[in-house]
Image (cartoon, grey):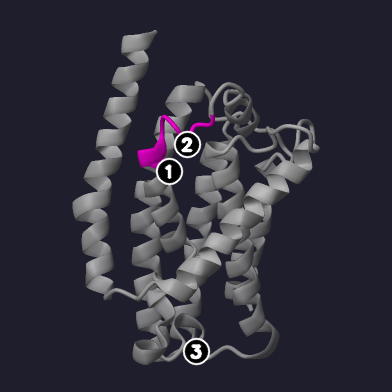
Amino acid sequence: ILAPAIIVATSLLSFAVIPFSPGFVVADLNIGILYLLAMSSLGVYSIVLAGWASNNKYSLLGGLRASAQMLSYEVFMGLSLLGVVILAGSFRLTDIVEAQHKVWFVVPQFFGFILFLIAGVAEARRLPFDLAEAESELIAGFHSEYSSMKFGMFFVGEYIGVTLISAAISLLYFGGWLGPVLPGWLWFAIKTMAFICLFILFRAALPRPRFDQLMSWGWKYMLPLALVNLVVTGGAVLAFE
């Protein structure tokens, strides 16, 4: 029961630093982005534990795949976020939202947004990157031996993770609660729901790549592109200061 409990707990704890509107946040940490990345790292323990404890070769393979995928794409996710941190001058999520009063960060950081979106889908293990539970290869992956409530908790954790990444995208790149006429919390909810719908669209529209292709794309293309985005953003900020 420890494995599904860990994934649900880490997903829920991540929401502690998500500001829904001005002043409506559980913990307005000055290292909010680092906290989010740390919580997503802890979720890997759940996957490895579930795969190993099941005493099933398919579960073990699924756990190893998921841990390699999550740890790899977390690197690219963190690097793509640094462009936003440079522009806002802060790791605090409320400061990042307030820095988007004039223009949303998706405009100067469109490249970083695309990288973050791809890494977010891989981190959430959603189609087309659900290779840890590819039914045609690994039955149900690391939760093959789970049933009933424990099985359900894995999916609860997964969908909470999708909501979390959608909320993070709306805060970091689309101005969070900023918007005309409507209350701030409603703008935040609309933007978050739009990205949840995008995740569902990906599931319906995109084919699943092979695991070696996924890892190759990450280390050969996404890592260099994230570094280029970081260097260009830093250079532009220094040049225009």
Q: Residues within 10 Å of mark 1 (few under 14, many from 20)?
A: many
Image quadrant where residue 98 sits: top right
Q: Residue furthest front?
A: 181
Q: Nearer the viewer, residue 16 or 126?
A: 126
Instruction: Return the x and y of residue 212 as percentages of the image width and height.
Output: 22, 71
Instruction: Return the x and y of residue 60 as percentages of the image width and height.
Output: 39, 82
- The reply to whether dot 3 and dot 1 touch (C-beta < 8 Å) is no
> Distance from label 3 to label 1 (Cα)?
34 Å
- The reply to whether dot 2 and dot 3 touch (C-beta < 8 Å) is no
The answer to whether residue 111 is magenta is yes
| Element marked by disc 3 | loop
Instruction: Return the x and y of residue 186 as percentages of the image width and height.
Output: 77, 45
Rendered view: 193 above or below 146: above
Q: Which kind of residue does numbered mark 3 sit on?
A: Ser
Q: Which residues are magenta?
A: 104-113
Q: Nearer the viewer, mark 3 or mark 1?
A: 1
Label 3 sits on residue: 144
Relative placement, left or right, of 39 versus 127 is right
Label 1 sits on residue: 113
Q: Residue at x 44, y 90 (%)?
A: 55
> Distance from label 2 to label 3 (Cα)?
39 Å
Label 2 sits on residue: 106
Label whose residue precedes the other's in the sequence (3 or 1): 1
